[in-house]
Amino acid sequence: MSRNLAALVALAALCGLVLQFLASGATEGLADPLLRLWALGRFFTILTNALVFVSFALVALGRNPGDGWMAGVVLSIGMVGIVFHLLLAPEVPLTGLTFWADLWLHTLTPLFAVLWWLGWGGRALTLADVPRWLIWPAGYCLYALLRGQIDGIYPYFFLDVGRFGATRIALNIAGLCLGFALAGLVLLGIARALARGARLARP
């Protein structure tokens, strides 16, 4: 059951990625598939959905990367959904393929991943996992800033050094990592509560 549902989560992530790739073809200058991949690769949403696809596909194939790894992946994709809906959702409703890509990448895949973890995710987590979960978002921020220095394009407004300056961006990144850490602590607390409940439910 767990592996079958993990396969569905992987397919959800893949669906969103494919739809976004197709939708981006209508953007000026992105008709070339390689240029399109390069452009999409600057976004945390895209990279994290790709991570979800690979990780959940491994679970579906019986090669679980481990409880800590999967919890970190679920944390990251969950934060994708939260940050998007709180800060980044467009004011003008999307249409066509862009609407469907957005729905899968920012809403359905995060929801499915979290639900899978709540039902079937491993509970062998420790406090030491929390700082490890920060490696992905912190590493991404460094990557995005380096790309921005090269081509002048920053994928998210809170990483735009040219607009806000280095000090403000450093504070933004610190705040983002703090948000991830707090969410990670919540995740850890939920895992422990679920594990405790499972033990108490045993005859």
Image (tube, rainbow, N blue to C red):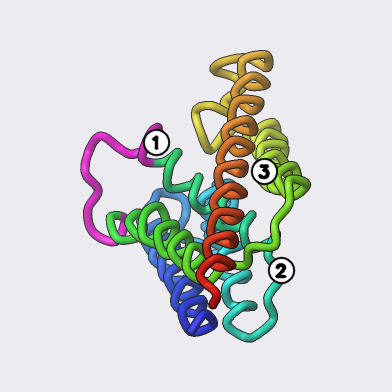
Foreground mark, 2 or 1?
2
Q: Which region shows up in magenta?
A: 85-98
Q: Which element carries disc 3, helix, strand or loop?
A: helix
Identify residue for label 3: 140
- Of the residues under marks 1 and 3, which one precedes in the sequence? 1
At horizontal 64% and vertical 54% (from top left) the residue drawn is 72
Identify residue for label 1: 88
CA separation in Å, label 2 and label 3:
22 Å
**Relative height, residue 92 to residue 57 (above, below):** above
**Relative height, residue 191 to residue 120 (above, below):** above
Which is nearer the eye, 21 or 55? 55
- Of the residues under marks 2 and 1, which one precedes in the sequence? 2
Disc 3 packing (10 Å; few <14; some 14–19; many ≥20): some
- Of the residues under marks 2 and 3, which one precedes in the sequence? 2
Which is nearer the eye, 135 or 50? 135
CA separation in Å, label 1 and label 3:
17 Å
**Relative height, residue 100 to residue 91 (above, below):** below
Which is nearer the eye, 62 or 101? 62
